[in-house]
Image: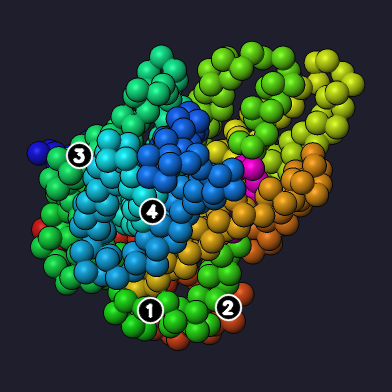
């Protein structure tokens, strides 16, 4: 059990083991699995296709046709995004019924079911089991990418909300890297063992099931939606490591009093509400840019560029691992500096740097046939694009979705953000081959333009949310939303911005009472 710590005179509590455990194990069974599933099908792709062909021959007596084989493989890969969309659409209802932590725990049932289907598909001689398993793990990822950022944002003190929120991005990158490592030929990336790559899905899910039940639920959810003040107080005490959490409770109560409707808002109500119009537009644009900035398309080119550079085919998996390492490293660095630099500068820097390196990559790709060392520069650009993405755009959109909306709007906001995320993901997978065929290496200029437009929008519209209460952030959008606050609302907002002084005021009041 975490021992309560003495209050820090600065008002900033140290990060507790309980809070770190909740962030790590919450992300381990959620965003880690999402990242793992982004990369896990790459290494065994040839073996899975061979399994499809073998099964087809055993069933029908003839080899599978080229078009049918391509269709089945395309469905296997793309159905992950369809599952993600289904998960995102269901998350609002699940969170309302089971809570934030409860939804994360329930979500493990999808991960375990998918692990079983994907592992046993070959033994059962059923490629349908693999396709259904990919759909179910997609549902798991769709729920996780909404429920986890919401949980992390609500359990974190505001001065480290970005740092804790970046656990989502860090574990996604770590999942991608783990999938690349386990997919090496010396480990599980070989024909007799490829199905064990999917068995690994059960391990993070089981670890989360063993640890997360003993960690606190979101205190904001307990207080504002369950009306459980005692439970919220205990949760705050464990997460913050201090006994007196009256300041945190009062901040939540102030937000609750300021909301016109304390009940959870539906998606339709959110879409119609003028009070959060620009928050919603900002999240839709940011989440669309997260997928449409072109990072997923980079993977199509990496191996081709490495081959052009003269690397042997058997060395490609090891060199490709550098992309996963760079991703993870950039996400960790972003998590360490986000509270100093802020969300807005990191987002703008990330998208702007991606635009620069996409432009350079286009130049290098067009000259790589004429200059022998040009492919090496192309690969450096690929690494730079990945690092730029993970420095901000890779994780901050999920943090912002939780920060730009007050409690009653948050589930619907995450549902819309998740829907945009997965639809954009599906659109890139569907359209990029056609863009690539038409524009060839100039296809990356399309993504450069997207990154530039996203940067301009964020510079003009997005306020900095670092170390601000959720009410402070809502107030930042009041002018652009053309909302005139009532005197009561204004007073509550003023009080919320002075919350840093509450502890000192209460201490003085206690001293005066004692005299």
Q: Position of residue 205 (x, y in %)?
A: 24, 41
Q: Residue at x 56, y 15 (%)?
A: 314
Q: Earlier in the sequence, mark 1 or mark 3?
A: 3
- Disc 4 crowd rating (10 Å Cα; few below 14, some 14-19, many 20+) is many
- Disc 3 crowd rating (10 Å Cα; few below 14, some 14-19, many 20+) is some
Secondary element at tag 2: loop
Quickly name the residue at label 4: 135
Q: How is the image coloured?
A: rainbow
- Disc 2 crowd rating (10 Å Cα; few below 14, some 14-19, many 20+) is some
Q: Residue at x 53, y 21 (%)?
A: 317
Q: Is residue 214 left or right of residue 45?
A: left
Q: Position of residue 379 (x, y in %)?
A: 69, 25
Disc number placed over residue 266 in the picture, else none = 1
Quickly name the residue at label 3: 206
Nearest the eye: 397 or 367: 367
Q: Is residue 277 above or below residue 284?
A: below
Secondary element at tag 1: loop
């Amino acid at each position: 059990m975490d021992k309560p710590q003495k209050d820090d005179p600065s008002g900033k509590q140290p990060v507790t083991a309980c809070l770190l455990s909740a962030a790590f194990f919450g992300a381990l069974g959620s965003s880690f699995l999402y990242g793992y599933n982004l990369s896990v099908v790459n290494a065994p792709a040839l073996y899975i296709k061979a399994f499809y062909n073998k099964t087809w021959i055993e069933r029908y007596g003839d080899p599978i046709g080229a078009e049918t084989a391509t269709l089945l493989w395309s469905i296997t890969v793309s159905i992950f995004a369809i599952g993600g969309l289904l998960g995102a659409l269901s998350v609002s209802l699940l969170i309302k019924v089971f809570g934030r932590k409860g939804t994360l725990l329930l979500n493990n049932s999808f991960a375990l079911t998918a692990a079983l289907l994907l592992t046993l598909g070959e033994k059962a001689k059923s490629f349908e089991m693999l396709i259904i398993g990919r759909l179910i793990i997609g549902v798991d990822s769709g729920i996780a990418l909404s429920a986890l950022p919401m949980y992390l944002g609500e359990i974190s003190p505001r001065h480290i909300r970005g740092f804790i929120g970046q656990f989502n991005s860090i574990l996604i990158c770590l999942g991608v890297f783990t999938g690349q490592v386990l997919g090496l030929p010396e480990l599980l990336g070989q024909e007799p063992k490829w199905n064990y790559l999917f068995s690994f899905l059960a391990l993070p899910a089981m670890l989360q099931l063993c640890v997360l039940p003993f960690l606190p639920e979101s205190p904001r959810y307990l207080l504002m939606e369950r009306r459980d003040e005692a439970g919220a107080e205990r949760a705050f005490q464990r997460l913050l490591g201090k006994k007196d959490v009256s300041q945190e409770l009062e901040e939540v109560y102030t937000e609750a009093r300021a909301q016109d409707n304390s009940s959870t808002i539906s998606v339709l109500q959110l879409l119609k509400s003028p009070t959060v119009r620009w928050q919603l537009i900002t999240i839709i644009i940011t989440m669309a840019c997260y997928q449409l900035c072109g990072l997923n398309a980079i993977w199509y080119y990496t191996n081709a560029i490495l081959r052009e550079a003269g690397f042997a085919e058997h060395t490609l998996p090891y060199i490709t691992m550098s992309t996963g390492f760079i991703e993870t490293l950039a996400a960790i660095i972003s998590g360490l500096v986000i509270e100093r630099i802020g969300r807005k500068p990191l987002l703008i820097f990330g998208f702007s740097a991606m635009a620069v390196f996409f432009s350079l990559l286009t130049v290098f790709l067009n000259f790589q046939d004429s200059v022998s060392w040009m492919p090496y520069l192309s690969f450096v650009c690929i690494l730079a694009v990945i690092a730029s993405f993970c420095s901000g755009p890779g994780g901050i959109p999920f943090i912002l979705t939780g920060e730009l909306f007050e409690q009653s709007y948050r589930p619907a906001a995450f549902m819309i953000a998740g829907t945009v995320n997965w639809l954009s993901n599906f659109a890139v997978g569907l359209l990029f081959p056609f863009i690539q065929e038409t524009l060839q290496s100039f296809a990356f200029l399309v993504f450069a333009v997207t990154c530039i437009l996203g940067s301009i929008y964020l510079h003009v519209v997005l306020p900095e949310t670092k170390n601000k209460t959720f009410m402070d952030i809502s107030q930042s959008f009041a002018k652009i939303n053309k909302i005139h606050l009532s005197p009561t609302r204004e007073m509550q907002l003023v009080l919320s911005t002075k919350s840093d002084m509450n502890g000192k005021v209460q201490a003085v009041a206690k001293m005066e009472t004692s005299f």
